[in-house]
Image (spheres, rainbow, N blue to C red):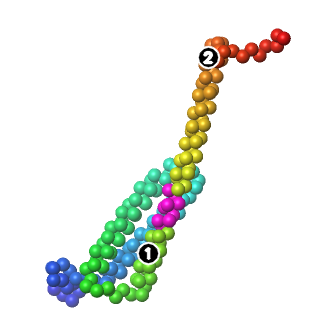
Amino acid sequence: MNASDPTPSADGTAAPQVSDLESLIDQRLVTLQTLLSLTDRQEEIIGAGHMSPLMPLLAEKQRWIEAFVDQSTRLVDLRHRFPEPPALSTLHRQRHQQCDQLHRELLEREAGCEQQLTSSRDILEQQLTQSQGVAHAVSRYNEVGSDGRAGPGGALDLSNDG
């Protein structure tokens, strides 16, 4: 074993290193910045009403979300392996706080996207219902006019016979 090898702890696992913790904080920050960038694109797509590019974007975003969850889990697990709070650099303490802020922002913006999609869905549903009603009326009108007979409501005589 040389000086750069981690010292094993009492349970046989390598002792946690502050540099590992700082590296995970850096990874989380990059991941959150990427997620927010993808959210920018998501908001643009939803705002423009272009739903076809939304699914591939959400699939890509899901991979980044999974990476963020994994990084967060590893960060918590690693933090718990320290016998007392580790001495992070000021830079990494700030980055960790920035991660918390970006995560809150991401959650708020996701809620906004969901609300906007729900509103769009409701509007489309109303338009579809109206369209179906109009189509049904046109269909009934065409049934009456195509065979020259009146439907169940009788015929309306518009002649000017006096």
Q: Identify the image quadrant of the C terminus.
A: top right
Residue at (62, 16) in percent of width and height: 151
Q: Nearer the viewer, residue 85 or 39?
A: 85
Which residue is identified by label 1? 99
Which residue is identified by label 2? 152
Give the SS element for disc 1. helix
Left of 47 or right of it: where is 60?
Answer: left
Q: Position of residue 56 (x, y in %)?
A: 45, 53
Q: Residues within 10 Å of mark 2 (few under 14, many from 20)?
A: few
Residue at (53, 47) in percent of width and height: 121
Q: What secondary structure characterizes most of the magenta part?
A: helix
Residue 72, compared with residue 121, is above or below; it is below
Quarter occupied by residue 14: bottom left
Q: Which residues are magenta?
A: 106-114
Q: Is residue 25 visible?
A: yes
Q: Nearer the viewer, residue 41 or 46?
A: 46
Q: Position of residue 129 (x, y in %)?
A: 57, 37
Q: Nearer the viewer, residue 1 or 140?
A: 140
Residue at (46, 56) in percent of width and height: 57
Q: Amino acid at mark 1?
A: Cys
Q: Amino acid at mark 2?
A: Pro
Residue at (56, 50) in percent of width and height: 120
Q: Position of residue 28 (x, y in %)?
A: 39, 72
Q: Position of residue 21 (x, y in %)?
A: 33, 80
